Every structure is written in C-alpha cells, then in structure tokens.
Image (cartoon, grey):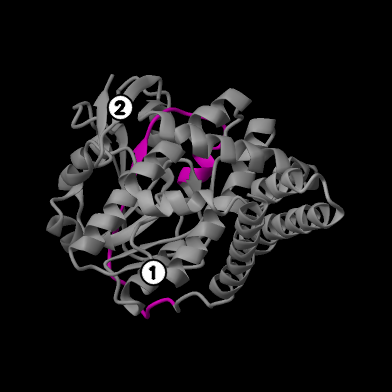
Amino acid sequence: MIYLLFGLALAALAYQLLALASLGRFFGQPLPSPQKRPQPGVTVFKPVCGLDEKTRECLESFLHQSYDQVQILLGVADYRDPALPLLEELQATSPHEVKIILCPEKKGHNPKISILRQLEPHARYDIWLVADSDVRVGRDFLSSAVAALGEKGAGLVSCPYRAGEARTWGAWLEALTISADFIPSVAVALYVEGIRFALGAAMIFRRENLCRIGGFAALADYLADDYQLGWQMYCSGAKVALIPYVVETVNPEMSLKDYFLHQLRWTRTYRICRPKGYLAYGLTHALVWSLAACGASGLAIYAWGLAAFVLAVRLALAWFAERLCLKGRLPAAAFLLLPVKDLFAFGLWLLSFLGNKVTWRGARFRITADGKLVPV
C-alpha cells in the first residue's frame, strides 16, 4: 500500500509540474492582432438577473468597447427586475446600439438559456458573443475576440477568467479553486487533448455554427450550458479555441456553505459531463496523496520531505496562476488556505460520486446521465 500511495503522490506531483509548464506556455503566447477596418458586426447577448454593486461596471465594460459595429441585447426575465432602471440609463448613454428585451417565457430549466432563446430573433449580425452579466472586460476585448475567431479559423472562441475582489473566506476559496485547480486543468487539457468545450464567462462564435447544433434551444435543459455549447459545436465539426485574454467575474461574498454547494454542483456536473477526465482529476490531488503516503510510512522524514515539496509546488502553482497569469488580486493571506482547499476539494471529489442531485438558484434538480436538469 505504501508504494501505491507514493506512486500516486509522485504522479500527482508530475501533473502539478505539467500544469505549471502548460500555464507558462499558454499565457506566454501573444493575442491575435485586431482585424483592419471595416470590422464585422457583432451582436452581444447579455442575460441580466438582479443588481449588485458591480453590475454597472460590468455592463459598461461591454457598452463602451473600442469596436465599430456592435449591437447589444440586454435580456431580463421579469419586468420587476431591479436592474431594469440601470439598463435604461445605460441604453441612453451607450455609443452602440442597445436593446432591452423582456423575456418572460420559461423555455427550459436553464434560466440563462431561456433568456438567450428569446433574444436570439433580435440579433442583427452573424457574429455572436454571449457573456454573463457579472463579467468585466477590457475595451479591446471585442477586437481581440473577433480577431481570434478569424485568425484561428474557429467556430467558437472562449477565454480564461479570474475571480474579482474577494472579501470572505468562501470567496477566497472560490478564487483559489479557479486559479490553483480549474485554469491549470484547462491549460493541461489544451495541450494534452485539445479544447472541446467552452468557458462560459465570455464566448464568441458564428451564428451558422450555433444553428448547426439547433440554436440555443439545444442547450435549454443543461446545467453546464457553456461546456455543452463547446462540446456540441466540436461534435458538429467546428473548431473550438481558447485565447489568453483574461476576463474578470464578480466574486460574490460567499459563505463557506455557499462555496460548498457551488463546488458540489460543479463537481457533480463535471463528473457527468467528463467521466473519464473527472476520474483522472482525483489522481491529481498531490497534497492528499503525499499526506496519505506520509501516514502509511509511519511519519518517516523522507515522506514529510515529499509532502513539504508537494505543498511548495502547489503554492507556486497557485501564485503563478493567480498573480502572473490571471493578474488577480487575491491577498497573500488567502494562499494560506490552499492546504484546506485541497483537502476540501478531495472530499468533494469523493462526495460527488454519492449522488446526482444539486441545488441551483434555490431549486433542487437531478442531473441525468447526459447532463440535463430534471426538477426534484
């Protein structure tokens, strides 16, 4: 048993080093050069639900792009949504065409996709960008994304994201999960098997590629709609690409319970969407396996040395990803939670196999074998 545990620890350590190398290679490449004018028109889809202190800043980052032809569709499901007055104010001041569209119908179990389906008939241009309302981008984002769509010959382009300002322990853990686990795993997947999925913070694609898979209606009942959008386009023959442009998502003031429920929902969804990859993900928990080997060895000095080295590599990976690659602002004290997060993540990995029910937006769902939502 001790040899097995040491073998797992060394394999997981090798993965961490591979992740470091993959991050350096991916973020070291230049962004595509913006296309010369005239630039093709872009329709931006923005489902909006609710209002917080960052909503204005996030929406304005899209409404004031340094791009010529932009149509922005703002969709809300309820005329009583508190964001509506802000949307009307932004519509009046935006230099681009902005339409506010009420989307009251419930078209599927995924509320975001339901809004997108109702925005779809209003799109003027053939290049579409979908971005969550809690995402903030730079003024050159559209130029870079459209250039990537043409330069890489892709049917869909997405990009990595970082968590915004974190002010609670749950938010710190969420930011660490993104920088120390998720983004490194995406970089490794890029070079090991290629990208066959999309990252949902911001996705740009051509109308024809979406129509080929059946439009937004094809995603109506999926929880992981971003993964399904990329995967279904890939299966339809479109190339899916990733560019090193980092966008920022609002990091809500999560409690530890909020973090736990969010990660449990994510792990169970990931397990169903990518069962083989998710099983392999369990083998990447280097700190857990090194501590297990340490216990099996009777707390031998050489085992403690391995565990200490693994922890140093994990901290280096988290710091490298968060500060140098994603340009995040997570405080130094938050990195002290990394061992806790790693142990917590392994527990969630085990727990994800014990059921297929999740809580999302206050409702309970069962996730089917193909990743669809069924109300409980």
Q: Which residues are magenta?
A: 34-59
User: Around disc 2, counting alpha carbons within 10 Å, would you say few (fewer than 14), some (14 to 19), or many (20 or more)?
Assistant: some
Q: Is residue 105 above or below residue 191?
A: above
Observer-nearest residue: 203 or 274? 274
* Element marked by disc 2: strand
- Please identify the residue farthest to the front as the structure is shown: 1
Three-letter amino acid code of the residue under disc 2: Arg
* Residue 43 highlighted magenta (yes or no): yes
Q: Is residue 198 above or below residue 41?
A: above
Three-letter amino acid code of the residue under disc 1: Gly
Apparent side of residue 167 relative to residue 241 in the rendered image (left or right): right
User: Around disc 1, counting alpha carbons within 10 Å, would you say few (fewer than 14), some (14 to 19), or many (20 or more)?
Assistant: some
From this viewpoint, is residue 336 visible? yes
Q: Is residue 85 above or below residue 144?
A: above
Q: Position of residue 226 (x, y in %)?
A: 34, 49
Measuring 47% from the left and 29% from the top, which residue is drawn there? 51
- Which numbered dot is residue 194? 1
Pointer 1 or 2: first along the chain? 1
Apparent side of residue 183 relative to residue 232 in the rendered image (left or right): right
Q: Position of residue 103 (x, y in %)?
A: 23, 31
Observer-nearest residue: 72 or 77? 77
Observer-nearest residue: 98 or 354? 354
Apparent side of residue 194 relative to residue 311 in the rendered image (left or right): left
**Residue under label 2:** 366
Q: Position of residue 329 (x, y in %)?
A: 70, 50
Q: Quadrant of residue 310?
A: bottom right
> Are circles 1 and 2 on residues that touch, CB within 8 Å?
no
**Number of marks in the image?**
2
